[in-house]
Amino acid sequence: MTFTDPEVGSVGLSEQAAREQGLRVQTGTTQLPSSTCGWIHKAGNEGLIKLVEEADRGVLVGATSIGPVGGEVLYGLAVAIQAEVPIERPRHMIYAYPTFHRAVEAALTDLRRA
């Protein structure tokens, strides 16, 4: 985690690191300004959430969060990565609304399209 404005942080493997380890990966990304909380936040809402899934096992192996409260958004993603939670579980969660955490849901939707 880097304490900047906006906050920048990541957990697990980056897409490049995962590929270098020989993993077959898919990624999903969403831009924070397109989220409801990003729209409400207005100025200073720049950022994104990127998810890295190991496609063969169907689990997240990495995540990056850039934006307001970016470090806090990583908490649930860190638990999912550490516990090797199947990707379908976070897809069926109910995310608090309107929060920047809700943008994880949009990144998961983008991941499904990959």
Image (cartoon, grey):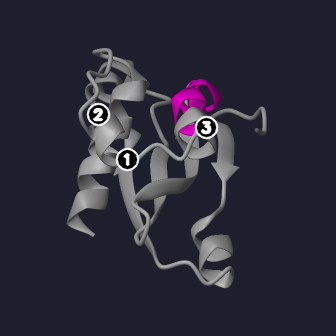
Looking at the rendered image, the disc whose residue lies closer to the viewer, 2 or 3, is 3
Category of crowding for the residue at label 3, using alpha-carbon neighbours closer than 10 angstroms: few (below 14), some (14–19), many (at least 20): some
How far across and down, in percent of the image, does residue 78 sit? 61, 37
Category of crowding for the residue at label 2, using alpha-carbon neighbours closer than 10 angstroms: few (below 14), some (14–19), many (at least 20): many
Which contiguous range is marked in magenta? Answer: 69-77
Provide the major secondary structure of the magenta segment.
Answer: helix
In the image, which disc is placed on residue 83? Answer: none
Residue type for callout 2: Ser
Residue 75 in magenta stretch: yes
Category of crowding for the residue at label 1, using alpha-carbon neighbours closer than 10 angstroms: few (below 14), some (14–19), many (at least 20): some
How far across and down, in percent of the image, does residue 77 sit? 53, 37
Q: Name the residue tied to disc 2.
A: 35
Q: Name the residue tied to disc 3.
A: 78
Indicate which disc, 2 or 3, sits on the residue closer to the N terminus. 2
Which residue does the image show at 37% across and 47% down from the upper left?
31
Q: Quadrant of the N terminus?
A: top right
Residue type for callout 1: Gln
Q: Is residue 10 above or below residue 39?
A: below
- Real-space Cα distance between discs 2 and 3? 21 Å
